[in-house]
Image (cartoon, rainbow, N blue to C red):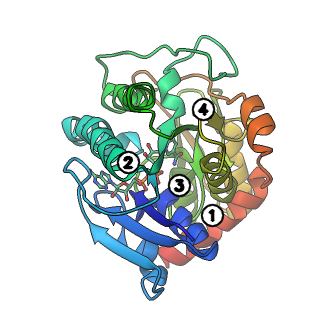
């Protein structure tokens, strides 16, 4: 049994991670400032004596005794991270400094939830970990992309300078129950629009592609990465390489919800990547992992969650 800190633990991914680590018998300290996360996401865990929920903003130092840290705190969707972009950069950068400082003090292993956004609008496809990315440093997405890039830099400098036991996961689009219903992410958007009988808005012509990983698969990979030997740092791409156009996703959601929604085209937002697909060769060989939940199955579970939520 380990004492494990999860920052951003009341968020979408964080709440699933809390759940899984408790199931494995660990003690979990869930830290969140509830910026985009919700108490509801972990309400079913609070009676567990091995679970503790703490309101705290990671841009301030934290003094606790733990064996391992998963650093997930950061708003993840454009709507939320662009609402207060200065705070987004602070959360990524000061948050990383504070959590790395904590890991150094207590000699804890620490994993960073990084993102495929570090690749920006990529010229290579699919993206491998060696690719340095093509990121606009001054655009509306930069607070998130550059904040996450700087956090990776800090992780690797703590590794080189202080021999810290770090792991970096580059997470690609993930979906599932407990996504925020109004965060503008494509899967939740489409499902909520369909369930409310509204038309589905797609940006551009809908031919841009994305790959979608179901949350259970993602959590499994994060835990496996945390369990790799000291010295293996990543970064490791985690995502589902199955590629779908946004239009295909919309049509699938309409079919599975039985909605009568039509597809409506809207202008493409600035710096919206045209293609994004992970190369998961490293995760396959190093973590013996690959995603198992097909899109149709994952969508059914996510639709069931939103249908209950919207009732
Ligand atoms: N879901 C995805 O597809 C995806 C893809 C790439 C990377 N990620 C990364 O995974 C992590 C979790 O994402 P998510 O999808 O669960 O998003 P989320 O918004 O549901 O979760 C983020 C959590 O961090 C908390 N938080 C934000 N700022 C904080 C602060 N200053 N102090 C303490 N807590 C704070 C929020 O309240 C929320 O609970 C993020 O770091 C995100 O960048 C997610």
Helix, strand or loop at label 2? It is helix
Circle nearer the viewer, 4 or 1: 4
Gap in Å between the C-alphas at discs 3 and 2?
34 Å
Q: Between disc 4 and disc 2, whose residue precedes?
A: 2
Q: Secondary structure at mark 4?
A: loop
Q: Residue at x 23, y 55 (%)?
A: 57
Disc 1 C-beta below 8 A from ligand 1: no
Distance between mark 1 and mark 3 Cα atoms: 8 Å
Name the N-terminal-most of marks 4 and 1.
4
* Placement of the N terminus among the 4 image quadrants: bottom right
Give the mark, 3 or 4, whose residue is nearer the N terminus. Answer: 3
Q: Quadrant of residue 277?
A: top right
Q: Pointer 4: what residue?
A: 234
Q: Nearer the viewer, residue 60 or 279?
A: 60
Q: Residues within 10 Å of mark 3 (few under 14, many from 20)?
A: many
The residue that label 2 is drawn on is 103
Q: Which mark is residue 302?
A: 1
Instruction: Check whether the beta carbons of the residues at disc 1 and disc 3 lie within 8 A of each other.
Output: yes
SS of the residue at dot 3? Answer: helix
The answer for how far apart the CA atoms under marks 4 and 2 are is: 18 Å
Give whichever of 201, 158 is nearer the camera: 158
Camera-side residue of 246 and 155 = 155
Between 232 and 248, the one nearer to me in the picture: 232
Q: Nearer the viewer, mark 3 or mark 2?
A: 2
Determine the image quadrant of residue 65.
bottom left
Disc on the earlier residue, 3 or 2: 2
- Residue 212 image position (x, y, % from top left): 66, 44
Label 4 vs label 2, nearer the camera: 2
């Amino acid at each position: 049994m380990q004492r494990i800190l999860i920052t951003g633990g009341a968020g979408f991914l964080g709440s699933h991670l809390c759940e899984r680590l408790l199931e494995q018998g660990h003690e979990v300290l869930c830290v969140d400032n509830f910026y985009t996360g919700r108490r509801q996401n972990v309400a079913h865990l609070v009676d567990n004596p091995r679970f503790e929920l703490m309101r705290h903003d990671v841009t301030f130092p934290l003094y606790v005794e733990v064996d391992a840290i998963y650093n997930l705190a950061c708003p993840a969707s454009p709507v939320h991270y662009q609402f207060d972009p200065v705070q987004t950069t602070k959360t990524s950068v000061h948050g990383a400094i504070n959590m790395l400082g904590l890991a150094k003090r207590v000699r804890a292993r620490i994993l960073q939830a990084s993102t495929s956004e570090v690749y920006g609008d990529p010229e290579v496809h699919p993206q491998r970990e060696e690719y340095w990315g093509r990121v606009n440093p001054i655009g509306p997405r930069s607070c998130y992309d550059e904040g996450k890039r700087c956090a990776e830099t800090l992780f690797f400098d703590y590794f080189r300078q202080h021999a810290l036991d770090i792991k970096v996961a580059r997470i690609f689009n993930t979906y599932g129950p407990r996504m925020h219903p109004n965060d503008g992410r494509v899967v939740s958007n489409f499902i909520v629009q369909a369930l409310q009988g509204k038309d589905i808005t797609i940006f551009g012509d809908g031919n841009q592609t994305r790959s979608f990983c179901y949350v259970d698969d993602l959590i499994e990979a994060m835990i496996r990465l945390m369990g790799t030997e000291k010295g293996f740092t990543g970064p490791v791409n985690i995502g589902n390489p199955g590629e779908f156009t946004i239009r295909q996703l919309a049509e699938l959601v309409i079919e599975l919800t039985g909605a009568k929604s039509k597809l409506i085209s809207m202008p493409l937002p600035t710096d919206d990547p045209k293609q994004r697909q992970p190369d998961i060769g490293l995760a396959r060989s190093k973590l013996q992992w690959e995603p198992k939940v097909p899109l149709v199955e994952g969508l059914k579970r996510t639709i069931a969650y939103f249908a209950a939520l919207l009732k």
